[in-house]
Amino acid sequence: MGAAARSEDQLSLEARKALESADRRLFECIAAYELVTAPGQGQATSVPRHESDQIARAQAAVETAEGEAWRLREELLGWSKPGWVPGAAFLADWFSEDDAVYDDIAPAQTR
């Protein structure tokens, strides 16, 4: 079990910078992964050819960066990753800005 939970405001400047760096690295890896798995997303283009080794390397980078971000969150903030939270690579595969329209759809009324 990790340390008692605390807020980012309680951390030293050095610790906050470490967390920010880990989060930035994770977002950069996700962006690179999305470029590999969905180049030209949202543009009318032909279906791109995917190189499995390139995708595997990008996905491994996301998983490594995510692991480091959660390690620091647990060490510095006492936050453990919930078991139900999907991995960042999974979310990058299935959710894009285009999917935001589904958040605005009202449920159908039933009689």
Image (cartoon, rainbow, N blue to C red):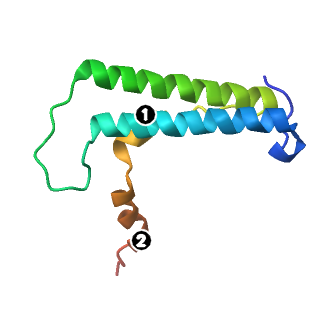
- Viewer-nearest of discs 2 and 1: 1
Q: Nearer the viewer, residue 52 or 2?
A: 52
Most extreme residue toward the bottom, as rendered? 111
Q: Quadrant of residue 19?
A: top right
Residue 109 % position (x, y): 36, 79
Q: Nearer the viewer, residue 59 or 32?
A: 32
Most extreme residue toward the left, as rendered? 46
From the viewer's perspective, is 90 left or right of 80?
A: left
- Residue marked by disc 2: 104
Q: Amino acid at mark 1?
A: Ala
Residue 89 is marked as 1
Q: Quadrant of residue 78?
A: top right
Q: Secondary structure at mark 1?
A: helix
79 up-or-down from 61: above or below: below
* Image point (29%, 36%), residue name: 37
Q: Secondary structure at mark 2?
A: helix
Callout 2 crowding tier (Cα within 10 Å): few <14, some 14–19, many ≥20: few
From the viewer's perspective, is 4 left or right of 45?
A: right
111 up-or-down from 63: above or below: below
* Image point (82%, 33%), residue name: 14
Residue 77 visible, this angle? no
* Image point (34%, 21%), residue name: 56
Q: Amino acid at mark 2?
A: Asp
The reply to whether discs 2 and 1 touch (Cβ–Cβ < 8 Å) is no
Q: Quadrant of residue 35?
A: top left
From the viewer's perspective, is 41 left or right of 89?
A: left
